Image (cartoon, rainbow, N blue to C red):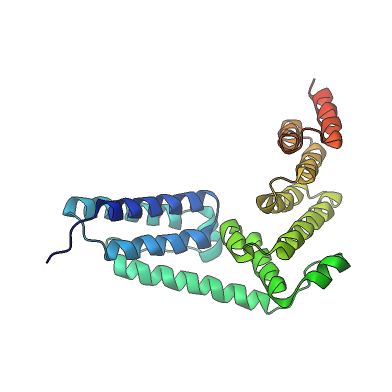
Amino acid sequence: MTEPIKRDDIAAIHKKLDECKLHVKRNNVYSCLSSFKEAMEKFLHTRMLPVDEKDLLKIINEFQYDLSHSATFKNIYGPVTFAENDIPTAVDFVGQLLQLREDEIQAEMLEDKPLQPDDTADNASAMGEESETRIRMAQTLLDRGDFGQAQETLGNDDVALAMILQICNSRGIVYRKAGDHDKAIAEYRKALYFHPDDEGLYYNVSRAYIEKQDWNAAAEAIQEGLKVNPEFREGKNLLAYIKKQLS
């Protein structure tokens, strides 16, 4: 008996491809490739009408083109050309790209670079080997802009999440004091990805923008912090100062 066509399966492929597009916008290349591989594998194992197959194939070809021309993808893999209208070959190729990325991450982890010279004794004593491994891998992924995979790596490890906050915030402070405000802001934003309810991070972002003389961005940053904690006294004072400069 011929297997019936399930519209839900086709819809699931479209949804997975939409997830891929979102990952690209967020610069999560590893997560994008992983989801893209899943979508194509499902395409290969889903029975569908010729019109649906043609439509999905067109979307996949277009996505491959957009992905290969995205700045984040090119920074990691360089110039790459995907096979059009050949899903099995594309699945194998994406699998190779994923394996390459994993190999690179493992190689960087083996360099045994210190986490951060100013780690607190409390966190260091609480951190086991598994948490330390997660932190090293997450740092590598964050530095490459793959926030989604870094989040998956840290999972619900509270010790590792606390250390990432400390590491990124400490780096941000060092960069800000050195006058490299863009790098400082990037580090604070990494920490905010995992700790969006930390008003102090928004305060640090705002200060970095102030030193850049970007008063509007500074105001937006501290206003986000005040949404988290409307009673944040230092935040209120900073916003009042910024508004005075803008008036």
The reply, left or right, for residue 13 in relation to residue 144 is left
- Residue ID at (71%, 34%): 227
The spot of residue 216 in percent (x, y) is 72, 30
Q: Is residue 237 above or below residue 156?
A: above
Q: Nearer the viewer, residue 11 or 149?
A: 11
Coordinates of residue 13 in the picture (x, y in percent): 34, 55
Whole-percent x, y for residue 219 in the image: 75, 32
37 in relation to 173, above or below: below
Residue name at image x 25 percent, y 51 percent: 7
Counting from the top left corner in percent of width and height, residue 146 is at 58, 59
Residue 35 or 229: which is nearer the viewer?
A: 229
Using residue 73 as the reference point, say whether residue 142 is left or right of it: right
Q: Is residue 30 left or right of residue 202?
A: left
Q: Residue at x 54, y 70 (%)?
A: 101
Q: Quadrant of residue 151?
A: bottom right
Quadrant for the C terminus, please: top right
Q: Quadrant of residue 147?
A: bottom right
Q: Quadrant of the N terminus?
A: bottom left
Q: Decide: is 74 above or below 104.
A: above
> Would residue 81 be visible to someone looking at this image?
no
Between 245 and 43, the one nearer to me in the picture:
43
Residue 68 versus residue 245 in the image, above or below? below
- Image quarter for residue 204? top right
Q: Quick check: can you spot residue 85?
A: yes
Residue at far top of view: 247
